[in-house]
Amino acid sequence: MDIQQVKRMIGITTDKHDAYLSEVVPILIEYASDFCKNNFELGTLPAGVKIFVAKATEYNMTPSGLSGRSMGDVSYSYNTEFPQHIMKNLYPYRKAYR
């Protein structure tokens, strides 16, 4: 899966984010491989994994949402996990532990 395919899937038409995409796409493929306990070949990724990589890339390109805040002693917390609607694309490819 190359960055041009990811750009087409999420609707990016400029080259502005190419450096970011070239770094994050292999990382997300590795994340999917680890999560599914499955070695995916780069040229033969299943459709659900491709959708996950595109949606996760798009999600990471938006500012992280603030999930909590305290006013007294300043305390912030951020949501750093992928939402369920993105992760569900990987479930059919996940292998069970033995």
Image: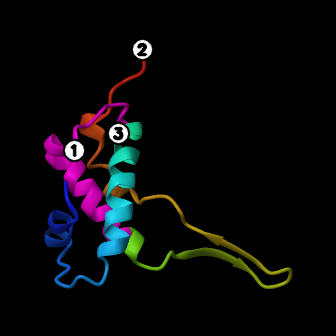
> Could you tell me how far apart the alpha carbons at marks 3 and 1 are, in whole angstroms?
11 Å
> Could you tell me how far apart the alpha carbons at marks 2 and 3 are, in whole angstroms?
17 Å
Residues packed near mark 2 inside 10 Å, few (<14), some (14 to 19) or many (20 plus): few
Residues under numbered marks 2 and 1 in contact, where contact means CB atoms less than 8 Å apart: no
Of all residues shown, which one is farthest toward the top?
98
Q: Which residue is mark 3?
A: 33
Quarter of the figure that contains the N terminus: bottom left
| Amino acid beneath label 3 | Ser
Q: Is residue 25 above or below residue 46?
A: below
- The image position of residue 13, as x and y in percent, is 16, 83
- Indicate left or right for 56 with 51 as reference: right
Residue 90 occupies quadrant: top left
Which residue lies at the image location 30% right of the left edge and 49% below the top edge?
Answer: 88
- Mark 2 vs mark 3: give the one in front: 3
Which residue lies at the image location 40% right of the left edge and 47% below the top edge?
Answer: 31
Question: Of label 3 and label 1, which has the lower sequence position?
Answer: 3
- The image position of residue 8, as x and y in percent, is 13, 71
Q: Which residue is mark 1?
A: 42
Q: Secondary structure at mark 1?
A: helix
Question: Of label 2 and label 3, which has the lower sequence position?
Answer: 3
| First to last magenta residue range | 36-59
Query: Does the stretch in magenta take in 49?
Result: yes
| Amino acid beneath label 1 | Leu
Q: Is residue 80 above or below residue 29?
A: below
- Indicate left or right for 61 with 93 as reference: right
- The image position of residue 66, as x and y in percent, is 58, 77
Residues packed near mark 1 inside 10 Å, few (<14), some (14 to 19) or many (20 plus): few
Q: Which residue is mark 2?
A: 98
- Indicate left or right for 42 with 85 as reference: left
Q: Is residue 54 above or below residue 29?
A: below
